[in-house]
Image: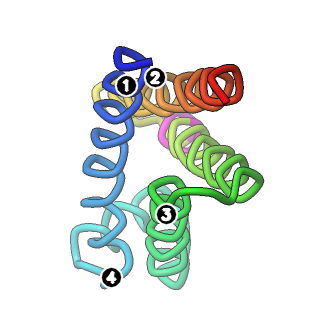
Amino acid sequence: MKKTNIIYWVFTGLLAVLLGIGSVFDAISAPEAVEHITRIGYPVYLVPFLGIAKLLGIIAILIPGYPRLKEWAYAGLAYDLIGAIYSHFASGDAPKMWAPLFVGLAIIAVSYIYHHKRRSELSYSA
């Protein structure tokens, strides 16, 4: 149980930090975020929406309880990164722009897998 908790919190912390920093810039419509999203063809009004949605997803993952909400949050964050990868790829960006996003997907996957391991271990110990 201890190993599972450590792995879960390390990857969930990485997830919160990595996506959280970017989502704050999106939420406040930082010029870099606006330039980045308009360069791949999306409208400016989408920037704060995505930032706030990612922040809410991260909060949902970090707070205890609410298992169904956590499932939706993990799915939403994964869809966000998959959509970003596809958008960069479709707009002709070089792999250096979209390949690192697979690291984010891997972090989400590990956090999600260990979230379920924690839940199953807690139900067995109860």
Label 3 to label 2: alpha-carbon separation: 17 Å
Q: Is residue 48 above or below residue 13?
A: below
Query: Badge 1 local density, few (<14 within 10 Å), some, or many (20+)?
Result: few
Residue nearest the observer in this picture, 95 or 112: 112
Mark 3 = which residue?
54
CA–CA distance in space, label 2 to label 1: 5 Å
Quarter assignment of residue 78: top right
Q: Residue 115, located in which quarter of the rendered image? A: top right
How packed is label 3: few (under 14 Cα within 10 Å), some, or many (20 or more)?
many
Callout 2–callout 1 Cβ contact below 8 Å:
yes
**Mark nearer the viewer, 4 or 1:** 1
What type of secondary structure mainly makes up the magenta span?
helix
Q: Residue at x 30, y 43 (%)?
A: 13
Residue bounds of the magenta highlight: 86-90
Instruction: Give the SS element for disc 4.
Output: loop
Residue 120 location (% of width, % of height): 68, 24
Give the residue type that dot 2 points to.
Answer: Ala
Amino acid at the residue labelled 3: Lys
Q: Name the residue under label 2.
A: 106
Residue 103: which disc? 1
Asked if residue 1 is positioned above or below residue 70 in the image, the reply reads above
Q: Do the residues labelled 3 and 4 touch (CB within 8 Å)?
A: no
